[in-house]
Amino acid sequence: MSIEKKKQILDAASKSFSVFGYKATTMDQIAKIAGVAKGTIYTLFTNKEELFNEILTQLIDEMSIVAQKSIRTDISFFENLHTVLYNMLDFRRSHELTIKLSFEIREMGTPAAKEAMKKMENVMLAFIKKQVERAVENGEMKECDPEITAFVILKLYVAFISDWEKRHEPLTNEEISKLFQLYLVEGLQK
C-alpha cells in the first residue's frame, strides 16, 4: 500500500475524529471520507483504537515541535518556560481534535478521549520536567523535585489560561507572564 494512501486515510480519520469525536467516529465514516473501501483501512490498522493512536501520536509530535520552536537562546529560563507553556497550551486548546476531545470528555466522559488528553498532558509534563532539570543543573533554578515542579507549573498555567476564563475575562499573554513571574519566580513572601 502506498504512503499516499496511508496519509489519505490518516487525514480522513483525523477529520472524522475532529468533527464527530472518538465515540461517534466509525471505520465506515473514515472510509467514506477517505474515498477507500473499509477493508483498505484494515490492511493498515487493526481497529479504530490503533488508527486513533496513530493520529494522537502525530498530534503530540506537532505539539512537541511547537514547544521546541518556542525555545530561544537569548532569553532566560523562566521567559522560555512561559513562552513554551503558553504556546503548547494554546496549540492544545486551538487544535480541532483536542477541542472535540475536551467536549467529549465533558459531555460523555469517553475513556479513550480522557486517555488521549492524559497522554498529551504527560508529554507536556515530561518536557517541562526536562527543562526544570536543565535549569537546576545550570544554576538558573534552586534544587527542587523536577516532577513535582513540572506538575505545579503546568497546573498553574492551565489555571491561568483556561480555568480563569470560566469566571473572568481572559488574561493576556503579558498578564500571564507577570503572574508567572510573581508566583513562581519571586514568590509572594515579602
Image: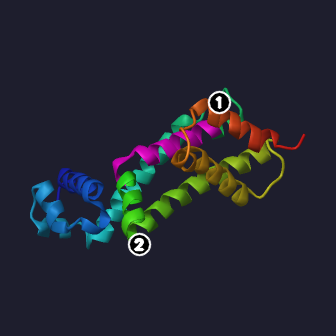
Disc 1 packing (10 Å; few <14; some 14–19; many ≥20): few
Residue 115: percent from left, percent from top: 45, 68
Residue 164 shown left or right of residue 26 in the figure: right
* Residue position for label 1: 73
Q: Which residues are magenta?
A: 82-97
* Residue appearing at x 44%, y 50% in the figure: 61
Residue 123: percent from left, percent from top: 54, 56
In the displayed image of the protein, which residue is found farthest to the top?
74
Where residue 152 sits, quadrant-wise, is bottom right
Residue 95 shown left or right of residue 140 in the figure: left
Residue 149 in the image: above or below residue 89: below
Residue 155 in the image: above or below residue 77: below
Residue 86 in the image: above or below residue 116: above
Residue 104: percent from left, percent from top: 36, 63
Question: Element type at marker 1?
Answer: loop
Where residue 189 sits, quadrant-wise, is top right
* Residue appearing at x 58%, y 33% in the figure: 173
* Residue position for label 2: 111
Q: Amino acid at mark 1?
A: Thr
Which residue is at the front of the view, 54 or 43?
54
Q: Is residue 84 magenta?
A: yes
Q: Amino acid at mark 2?
A: Pro
Q: Which of the image's four quarters has the C terminus?
A: top right
Disc on the earlier residue, 1 or 2: 1
Which residue is at the front of the view, 21 or 145?
21
Question: Element type at marker 2?
Answer: helix
* Residue appearing at x 14%, y 55% in the figure: 33
* Residue appearing at x 83%, y 43% in the figure: 188
